[in-house]
Amino acid sequence: MSAQKHTHARRSSIMAGYSAIGISATLIIIKAIAYHMNGSMGILSSLTDSALDSLISIMALASVYYASQPADSEHRWGHGKMEAVSALFQAAVITGGGLFLISESLHRLSHPHEMQNFGVGMGVMAISIVLSILLVWIQRRSLAESKSLAIEADSLHYSSDVLINSGALLVIFLTMQGAPYWVDVLFALGVAAFMGKLAYGIARKSLDMLLDKELPEEQRAQLIKVIEAQEKVAGWHDLRTRQNGNSVVITLDIEVNPTISLNSAHAIAKGLENDFLKLYPDAEILIHVDPEGDKADARHRVKGVHV
């Protein structure tokens, strides 16, 4: 990725971050007013989600700023993994919000509360749906340019907001039509369960990055195809890959004819590196050159998986 494209992608992520904070703050204010006037557990579910969204979006924006810093003497692989830390934090906050909803729902079951001001509640939920859709659109455009895990995680739970707000709108309408009070409570419990599932997915993806999980098999297969297309590469082993923020890290050993010059061996490795960069323009690539048939060195640490 050129410096100009990198700068544009960073600006796009930052704009998405500020948009998320602004919209979530607006939603918190209008939902708090609506809950005070209406008392719906559905609105409380949506308000809780928006309050968490605001906290999460601030963390996501901060992580985008930090992760975009260039590598330095103390962080020679860069700062990209801060986005995974942010996503893990998001998962923890979402889990906490779900537990809060469960607690409030159980309390409401034993202390029923009659809804009021149905029109206000329905109007606020309708506005919330429109604003959530707008924000998801902004974030999706940003993700098309910058594969930010923090923004991706943020976008996932804002996408869920559309469903949560739509459900809250439906619950208010049904209650207005005479549905029993426990429908509202049941919806809140469903939202809590959904938030738990969402948190699990975000946490798993962030831990994959933090624990240096290999890229998916189809991506490894693509890399192997590139390696084996190089006629002068006599063999290869110990292909390792991992995600590092918005980029990937690729390391491997290649075997070449032991009689060729150092310059020729370097040219082979350089050609392979350029082919990898066509697939992953931001990749960090480390290629070790061995004489053909020599596979013994201290870096072969994956027991039973030499290739």
Image (cartoon, rainbow, N blue to C red):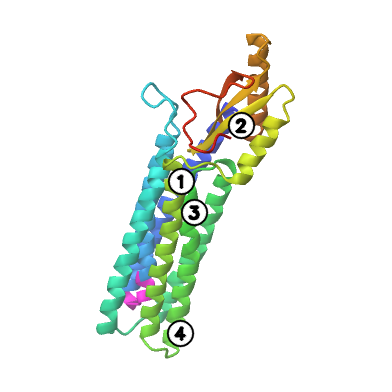
Q: Position of residue 56 (x, y in %)?
A: 37, 52
Q: Position of residue 247 (x, y in %)?
A: 53, 35
Label of residue 281 in the image: 2
* Residue type, label 3: Ser
* Residue type, label 1: Asp
Closer to the camera: disc 2 or disc 1? Answer: 1
Highlighted range, magenta: 37-44
Closer to the camera: disc 4 or disc 1? Answer: 1
Quarter occupied by residue 286: top right
Q: Position of residue 187 (x, y in %)?
A: 41, 76
Label of residue 298 in the image: none
Instruction: Decide if residue 167 is in sight here.
Output: yes
Q: Earlier in the sequence, mark 2 or mark 4?
A: 4
SS under mark 4: helix
Residue denoted by label 1: 208
Query: Quick check: 231 left or right of 292?
Result: right
Residue denoted by label 3: 155
